[in-house]
Each structure stands twice: as structure tokens, then as C-alpha cells.
Image (cartoon, coloured by chain):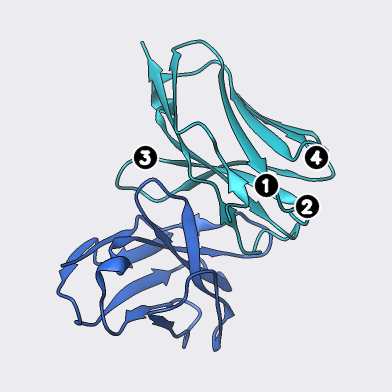
Chain colours: A blue, B cyan
């Protein structure tokens, strides 16, 4: 099915470990986004990209890095995992004429 | 500073009745508003949107009303169905382009009972 695919769905990390959350879309969307959702809170923007090679910080970028080498992929990197990064992470994509389309999320726990 | 607020964490409505979900915003630069619906273990899915040049937008059972002077919008679902039970997020952006960054509210959990 066409859409936004996120992997893995679940992950448990130890403090200080690193990992990459994968996001890929097959809709040829230029714009891609990473959000995190903490319990009882709304989604907060971490990073976004308006096209391959172009990324920018959102509201809560500290502790994360991104890259956008292709239109399809927008990985999110955690270099030194901290308990405060325990959250559900959502990737989204869009053109400029459609609402953002979300993946099903990655649930990350850091212990 | 919460720029988009959904003050009701939960709402319970009987099947067939109207559900009204509310959202307030503080940033006067917001001019495009969306409602997303989210089921457990899934990502948010787009439901309906409204531009600040309108005060009402309707799509089937779903209607969104915008009161710019009060910085308030609401989502009406009529009639409510059990499948509508989900968390509803209000979101806003500062540009009419849908690719603009979104600011989300904290969500309202709607339960439609039989």
C-alpha cells in the first residue's frame, strides 16, 4: 500500500545507545516531517525537510539529527539516547496541496 | 506556551447524538486549521480542514466551525457512530499552504457509546 512506512514499530534502548528511526514514503512528496508525541500531549515537530538535501529544525530538535539524501527517505538519528526521549515518533509527508499524511509511528523506550 | 489548546481531554456521547469537540488558539498568525483522528497504534489521519477565509466547512457527517474573533474552532460530528471513537487532534498552521509546519493541540478522546 502506498503511504508512509516507519521502522521499527517498537524499540527499547539503553541510555547512551544510538539508533536510527527509518521513514520512507512512496508518494513522491517533497515535504517530510518528524514529530514526537509524549503521553497526554500533542505532537511536537522535531525536524522537517522541504526536499532532498534540505532540512531544518522544528520545535524540539535537541538530541536528534536528520538527513534527506533522497525524496523517499527521511531518517531520524538519536546519538546518545536519554530517558527524556522515550516517546512515540511519527513521520509525515505531503505536497503543498494535501494535508500531512502520517506513518503509524515508532514506540521508543529508553531505560 | 501551548498555542493550540483542547481543554477537554475526553468526551462521551451516545450513538446517534451530536459530538462537539472544541479547540482554542492564541497565535493570531494561524490561518489554516485541521482536525486529525487517531486510533490506538496508528498514525493520525486527516479528517477535515478550514481556511481562515471561511467560517464553516462541511464534509458528510463532519463540520468544522471557525470563530476568528474568539480564536476558537469546533468539530461537529452528526450523527455520532461507534467507529468515531478515537482521539481527535486540532492542528493549526501559519500559512494556507498545507505543507506548512503544524502546531497540535493535546487531543480529545471521544467515546461513542451504544
In the rendered image, the vertical position of residue A24 relative to residue B30, given as above or below: below
- Marker count (numbered): 4
Assess disc 2: are there few (<14), some (14-19) or many (≥20) residues with their C-alpha within 10 Å of its C-alpha.
Answer: few
Front-lying residue, A81 or A100 = A81
Pointer 3 residue: B39
Q: Nearest to the eye among marks 3 and 4: give it.
A: 4
Front-lying residue, A109 or B80 = A109
Q: Position of residue A16 (x, y in %)?
A: 20, 82
Q: Position of residue A1 (x, y in %)?
A: 37, 56
Kindly report the distance in space between the C-alpha atoms of the residues bearing marks 3 and 1. Answer: 20 Å
Assess disc 4: are there few (<14), some (14-19) or many (≥20) residues with their C-alpha within 10 Å of its C-alpha.
Answer: some
Q: Are marks 2 and 4 in contact (CB under 8 Å)?
A: no
Numbered label attached to residue A12 = none
B25 with respect to A29 (left or right): right
Tell if the residue under mark 2 belongs to the same chain as the one under mark 1: yes
Q: For the residue labelled by badge 2, is the local secondary structure a helix, a strand or a loop?
A: loop
The answer to which of marks 3 and 4 sits earlier in the sequence is 3
Numbered label attached to residue B28 = 2
Numbered label attached to residue B33 = 1
Which residue sits at x=31%, y=73%? Answer: A21
Kindly report the distance in space between the C-alpha atoms of the residues bearing marks 2 and 1. Answer: 12 Å
Q: Position of residue B4 (x, y in %)?
A: 61, 48
Which residue sits at x=71%, y=36%? Answer: B72
Kindly report the distance in space between the C-alpha atoms of the residues bearing marks 1 and 4. Answer: 11 Å
The C terminus of chain A sits in image quarter: bottom left
Tell if the residue under mark 1 belongs to the same chain as the one under mark 4: yes
Amino acid at each position: 500500500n502506498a503511504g508512509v512506512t516507519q521502522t521499527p514499530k517498537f524499540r527499547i534502548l539503553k541510555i547512551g545507545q544510538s539508533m536510527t528511526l527509518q521513514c520512507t514514503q512512496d508518494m513522491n512528496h517533497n515535504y517530510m516531517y518528524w514529530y514526537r508525541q509524549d503521553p497526554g500531549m500533542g505532537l511536537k515537530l522535531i525536524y522537517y525537510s522541504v526536499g532532498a538535501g534540505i532540512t531544518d529544525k522544528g520545535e524540539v530538535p535537541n538530541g536528534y539529527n536528520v538527513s534527506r539524501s533522497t525524496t523517499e527517505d527521511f531518517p531520524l538519528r538519536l546519538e546518545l539516547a536519554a530517558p527524556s526521549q522515550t516517546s512515540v515518533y511519527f513521520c509525515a509527508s505531503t505536497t503543498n496541496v494535501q494535508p500531512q499524511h502520517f506513518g503509524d509511528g515508532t514506540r521508543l523506550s529508553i531505560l | 506556551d501551548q498555542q493550540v489548546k483542547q481543554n477537554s481531554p475526553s468526551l462521551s456521547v451516545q450513538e446517534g447524538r451530536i459530538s462537539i469537540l472544541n479547540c482554542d488558539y492564541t497565535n493570531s498568525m494561524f490561518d489554516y486549521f485541521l482536525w486529525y483522528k487517531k486510533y490506538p497504534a496508528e498514525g493520525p489521519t486527516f479528517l477535515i480542514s478550514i481556511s481562515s477565509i471561511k467560517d464553516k466547512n462541511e464534509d458528510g457527517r463532519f463540520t468544522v466551525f471557525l470563530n476568528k474573533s474568539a480564536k476558537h474552532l469546533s468539530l461537529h460530528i452528526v450523527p455520532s457512530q461507534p467507529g468515531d471513537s478515537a482521539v481527535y487532534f486540532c492542528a493549526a498552521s501559519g500559512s494556507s499552504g498545507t505543507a506548512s509546519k503544524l502546531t497540535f493541540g493535546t487531543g480529545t478522546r471521544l467515546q461513542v457509546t451504544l
